[in-house]
Structure formats: structure tokens, C-alpha cells
Image: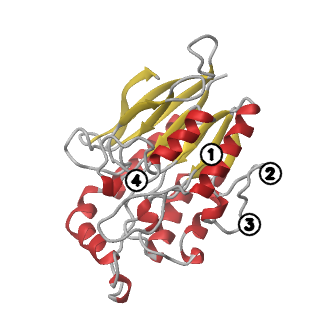
Amino acid sequence: MRYTLAHVSDWHVTSPAGCGLRELANKRLLGWLSWKQRRRHRHQPSILRSLFKDLKRQAPDHVAVTGDLTNIALPQEFAEAARWLADLGPPSWISLVPGNHDAYVRVPATRSWDLWSEYMVSDEPEAEGVAPTGTAPTPDEFPTVRVRGPLALVGVSSALPTPPGSAAGRVGSGQLERLARTLAELRARELCCVLLVHHSPVDDGFTPRRRLQDSAELRDVLRDVGADLVLHGHGHKTASSTIPGPEAAIPVLGVRSSSHCEELESRRAQYHLFGIERASVGDGARFAFSLETRGYDAATGGFGSEGERSL
């Protein structure tokens, strides 16, 4: 039986317009200047609406969102992003992990991630991090687990406030320990473990200020315990690589921003659509994956297929 999973990331279409000077008296000031000069022109709500329309037409079984829904983590942005999530679909159909822009500075949970809680919380009683109803997982409640058909979507948070000039992430030793236990339990149930994380576990292509600070430790967990697929955002570029796993290499896929209107081919908005099936024969992999890339066409204002391949 084939299961389909869509992957979108880095929406960045919320607006900081109208915020007060007090709210910019921290790292947000640099982010606001970046939004004013560049980001508000590059990330277009109309493109994200077009992506939503095309994605709904493709009707995947589930949707993974790997963070950066906001620009500078203003309370008004979290509320606006919640409306975008509701427009995309119900929480049962969408699994979300936060990005570094969603943790730009510290914001009370009631005015930030809690507004997205239904898209983030675990629904597995076996998961160690199950947040109370109406509240988003805290750092100590990740990873999250949501089982959909043959998939176990394992949400890892790499989002944390960082100093000005830094867009780095960190998983942390506690979360890594919980992740190892969680993956072992899920793999024992023969589920397809899809890891969702904003920052890539692969350092290539990222400067130190944008990397996952404990990427090596995350790769060690995946090498020892295993996962079947890792999906990330953050780079605003297509990225495809593998990392070692206990039985077979683990595919690691990064997707472009969902709203980027840049004329450069390497930046133009795309999303990914995965087909997932149990592997019959092969090199030790438990599941087989196909990938269709769907991209934005400025001439038509819509999204269309840009090719398929096997992973």
C-alpha cells in the first residue's frame, strides 16, 4: 500500500508591520530590518496560497511542516501563522516542528507555540513528551510522535533563541536520549520512522552560524538506532544526501521555502511529495521512497510537477 507525504517549510509570510519600538529593542531589530529590506519582497503570500491550492489538489495522506512560519517571532505573527495553518488543513492532517525564526527571541508560550499546539503535540501514549491539551510541547517534551498509517512522524525541536547574527540550532542531550529510546520502540513496531527537524543533521552547505550545533550527536543516534527518512528545512534550497544507519543509509532531504519568488532557479518556491511503500527487496532499507518535486511557475502563478525520482 502506497502512502503519500507532503513536505513544506519556511513560509515566512507573516508580517511584523505595526509592531512597537519596545518589541524591537532586542535581536528582533536586525530581523525587522532584514524583513523590511528583503524578506517581505522575496516571500509572497500569493505564492503560499497557490502552493496550498496545488497541495490540496494532490491530496496527500499527510503533510509535514518543518518550521519557520514567522519572521521575528512576534505574538501577532504566531496568530497570523495559526490562521495559515487552519487554512491549509486540520491538525490531524498536518504535523509541525518549529524553526529558528519561531524561536527568534523568548516569547511566552501562551502567545506563541501554544497557538499551534494541535499541530505539534504527540498523539501516541508511548511518547515521552505529551503536552496537556491546548499547550505546545516544551523543550523537555520533544521528540513528539504522531502515527499515521505506516508512518511514525517523529518531531524534533532544534529551535532555540540565539544571539544576534546566529541562526544556529541545537537538539540537546536530553532530547537526544529520549529520541534514541523513541526510535527504538517505533522501529520495533515496524513503523516507517520519518524524522522532522528544522536544521539539517548534515553540515555541508551551512556556515557555522547556521548549523545544527550538535549535528554529530544527532547523526550518532541515527547511526546506532536508525530512522527511515529525515526531512528538514532552514536552507531555502533543495538538499539531498544520506547518513549512515544501522542497516542502510538514511535519506536526508531538505526542501526550499514554500513562498520564495526569487528568480534564481535554486531558490524558487517548491514542495516535495513522497510516495512511501514497504520495500520488497533491496540493500537493507525497510521502506522504498519516491519523490515528486512540485514547483512554482511565475508565468501561470501555479505549481506543477518538476520531475520524479526514487530515493
Q: Residues within 10 Å of mark 1 (few under 14, many from 20)?
A: many
Nearer to us: label 2 or label 3? 2
Query: Type of residue at label 3?
Result: Thr
Residue 188 found in image quarter: top right
Up the image or down, 148 lies above or below 1; here it is below
Identify the disc placed on residue 154. 1
Up the image or down, 40 lies above or below 11; here it is below
Up the image or down, 145 lies above or below 105; here it is above
Q: Tell me which numbered mark, 2 or 1, is placed earlier along the sequence.
A: 2
Callout 4–callout 1 Cβ contact below 8 Å: no
Query: Type of residue at label 4?
Result: Asp
Looking at this view, name the residue that lies furthest to the right. Answer: 125
User: Residue at label 4?
Assistant: 10
For the residues labelled 4 and 2, the Cα–Cα distance comes to 30 Å
Query: Type of residue at label 1?
Result: Val
User: Residue at label 3?
Assistant: 133
**138 sits left or right of 64 in the view:** right
Say which of 5 and 88 sits in front: 5
Residue 58 image position (x, y, % from top left): 51, 35
Q: Residues within 10 Å of mark 3 (few under 14, many from 20)?
A: few
Q: Tell me which numbered mark, 2 or 3, is placed earlier along the sequence.
A: 2
Residue 41 image position (x, y, % from top left): 24, 60
Residue 199 image position (x, y, % from top left): 44, 50
**Which quadrant would the N terminus be assigned to in this image?**
top right
User: Residue at label 2?
Assistant: 125
